[in-house]
Image: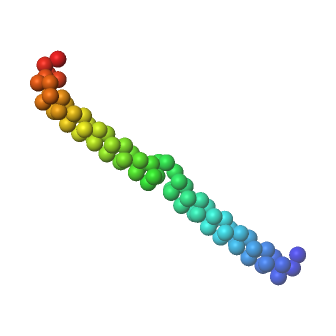
């Protein structure tokens, strides 16, 4: 094999290595976006916490309304 052909093969190998590295990096970026443990999953956790807080707030208001209408509190049970 000639030196010219050997150099050409080394350049092709280096180019392939660069392309694989670029693909791996792109895959990691995609995993970070799509991964449920990433920022999307975190957003859903915050949403769930917010819904729970609002649900508790609504339940508290309903308790006040029922107490006012019936004259009974949950402590009276």
Quick one: 8 or 24, which is closer to the camera? 24
The quadrant holding residue 64 is: top left
- What residue is at 18 percent from the left and 29 percent from the top? 66
- What residue is at 79 percent from the left and 78 percent from the top? 8
Does the image show residue 15? yes
Whole-percent x, y for residue 25 in the image: 58, 63
The quadrant holding residue 55 is: top left
Q: In this view, does 45 lie above or below 25?
A: above
The single residue placed furthest to the front in the displayed view is 69
How is the rendered protein coloured?
rainbow
Q: In what quadrant of the picture does the N terminus appear?
A: bottom right
Left or right: 72 as drawn, with respect to 19: left
Left or right: 40 as drawn, with respect to 5: left
- What residue is at 12 percent from the left and 30 percent from the top? 68
Q: Is residue 75 above or below residue 36?
A: above
Whole-percent x, y for residue 58 in the image: 25, 38
Does the image show residue 73? no
The single residue placed furthest to the right in the displayed view is 1
Q: In what quadrant of the picture does the C terminus appear?
A: top left
Quick one: 38 or 13, which is closer to the camera? 38
The quadrant holding residue 18 is: bottom right
Left or right: 77 as drawn, with respect to 13: left
Whole-percent x, y for residue 11 in the image: 74, 76
Q: In this view, does 57 lie above or below 1?
A: above
Quick one: 69 or 5, which is closer to the camera? 69
Quick one: 17 or 39, which is closer to the camera? 39
């Amino acid at each position: 094999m000639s030196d010219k052909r050997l150099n050409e093969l080394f350049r092709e190998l280096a180019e392939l290595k660069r392309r694989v590295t670029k693909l791996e990096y792109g895959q990691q970026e995609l995993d970070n976006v799509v991964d449920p443990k990433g920022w999307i999953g975190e957003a859903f956790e915050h949403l769930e916490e917010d819904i729970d807080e609002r649900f508790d707030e609504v339940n508290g208001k309903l308790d006040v309304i029922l107490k006012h209408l019936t004259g009974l509190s949950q402590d009276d049970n």
